[in-house]
Amino acid sequence: MVKYFLGQSVLRSSWDQVFAAFWQRYPNPYSKHVLTEDIVHREVTPDQKLLSRRLLTKTNRMPRWAERLFPTNVAHSVYILEDSIVDPQNQTMTTFTWNINHARLMMVEERCVYRVNEDNSSWTEIRREAWVSSSLFGVSRAVQEFGLARFKSNVTKTMKGFEYILAKLQGEAPSKTLVETAKEATEKAKETALAATEKAKDLANKAATKKQQQQQQFV
């Protein structure tokens, strides 16, 4: 039994811009789970297609119930191979990704096709498919459900990261992340509290000075 995912996304940038951003996606504020990326193979075919293979390392936090099934020394990082085929003539890019460790626990295979949007040639559409499977006897269904939910969450982060990098490459100010917004709000609150404290101290000092002057008048 395999869990299947099918999704369609649109980036409001041209195919050329998305192709350029694809190789510059990391790091970004939404990809903190991506630790390393390395190109291990690249070639141009006789028909002018670009073939690439990358090795990525990502964090792989297991659910608590799964951690009990594995020794504590089992690596919590997952190694992912990504093959890509870029066809500049037809303006398509196809990627295949799959994990090469922890495959018995969970295998996630993904296929994405990037092409020019049919309704707007200035936009790029992404057709994304994924297959989540597990070979663990007795808990494979639970593992697959968990894997599919996490995959959907990561897709959201991937698209936000893509938009962030595209905005930077196009010279726009990237929208702030929730963490950045919260940090700014916290700093502003601290500044406001500090200003209020200083003002309160100043008022207290003035009141004390006034009271002391009044007491001296009665002496």
Image: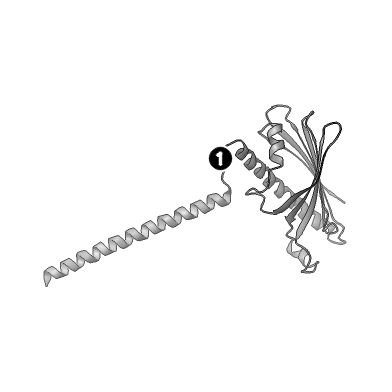
Check the image and report above or below for 94 versus 137.
Answer: above
Residue found 32% across the figure and 60% down from its top: 200
Residue found 64% across the figure and 38% down from its top: 166
Question: Which image quadrant is residue 70 in?
Answer: bottom right
Residue 205 place in picture, x, y as percent: 27, 64
**Who is closer to the viewer here, 198 or 14?**
14
**Who is closer to the viewer here, 29 or 24?**
24
Instruction: Say which amino acid is labelled 1.
Output: Ala
**Who is closer to the viewer here, 47 or 117?**
47
**Who is closer to the viewer here, 48 or 95?**
48
Quarter occupied by the C terminus: bottom left
Question: Which image quadrant is residue 111 in?
Answer: top right
Residue found 16% across the figure and 70% down from its top: 215
Q: Secondary structure at mark 1?
A: loop
Residue under numbered circle 1: 173
- Taking the image as shown, residue 192 lies to the left or right of residue 199, namely right
- Taking the image as shown, residue 196 lies to the left or right of residue 140, namely left
Residue 169 place in picture, x, y as percent: 62, 38
Residue 57 place in picture, x, y as percent: 75, 54
**Dot 1 crowding, Cα within 10 Å, few <14, some 14–19, many 20+:** few
Q: Mark yes or no: residue 110 visible.
A: no
Q: Mark yes or no: residue 26 visible.
A: yes
